[in-house]
Amino acid sequence: MSIVTLHDKSFTIYLSEETIQQKVRELADALNREYAGRRPLFIAILNGSFMFASDIFKHLTVESEICFIKLASYRGTKSTGQVITAIGLDQDLYDRDVVILEDIVDTGKTLHEFLPQLHHQQPRSFAIVTLLHKSEATKFPLSLAHVGFEIPDKFVVGYGLDYDGLGRNLKEIYQLAPDV
Ligand code: 5GP
């Protein structure tokens, strides 16, 4: 399929299934080398990263653990502003090699605001692996250990990413088509 329609919008193919799977294997290979003997704890950020996390985990040969969390933002007090909480983070991160698995880093705001909570638990090491990165859109500084694809600042769907609930099941990644 080279064009898909979700709700009222059309999307054109941007990354094929084969291209994505090849990159996932490369990322897994790199992680297998870096984390040999360290039993890393992978933390996949839901919802969007479920497919990426599942695929990359299948290619990991190092002894490793994975958990899935959801980041929810709510309005705190006037002084705290927006607060990000992690739902489902019940593992003890102290002295662990932690690897965050993200589907996409856009402005970087969500992770940037969440990281202090992780650091508070004093992991031994900490790294972010994202399949997609919109570097033009990134406004909050983040150190990304591995990026699958640098992509332009255009809305994408598929491979776990949705447009208003639809499109997560697509094996490819699609880009919003310009209005005609
Ligand atoms: P942030 O701006 O905090 O880096 O990104 C927050 C979240 O916005 C991402 O985790 C992702 O869920 C969503 N997002 C950002 N860009 C896109 C995109 O192009 N497509 C979809 N489907 N979601 C996106």
Image (cartoon, rainbow, N blue to C red):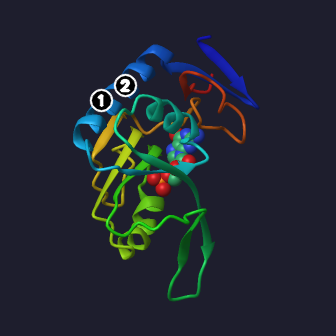
Image check: 108 left or right of 32?
right
Task: For the residues labelled 2 and 1, say whether their Cβ atoms are less than 8 Å apart.
Answer: yes
Q: Is residue 71 above or below residue 151?
A: below
Q: CA distance from mark 2 to mark 1?
A: 6 Å
- Residue 29's mark? 1
Q: Quadrant of the C terminus?
A: top right
Q: Position of residue 96 (x, y in %)?
A: 34, 61
Total marks in image: 2
* Local SS, label 2: helix
The tag on residue 7 is none
Along the line of sight, the residue nearer the viewer: 120 or 139: 120
Question: Where is residue 84 drawn, in percent x and y?
Answer: 54, 70
User: How far across and down, in percent of the image, does residue 126 sit?
Assistant: 31, 58
Left/right placement of residue 145 relative to residue 117 reads left
Farthest residue toward the right? 7
User: Which type of secondary structure does the marked residue at label 1 adopt?
Assistant: helix
Q: Residue at x 56, y 70 (%)?
A: 85
The residue at which mark 2 appears reads as: 25
- Disc 1 CB within 8 Å of nearest ligand 1 atom: no
- Eyeballing the image, is 27 above or below 83? above
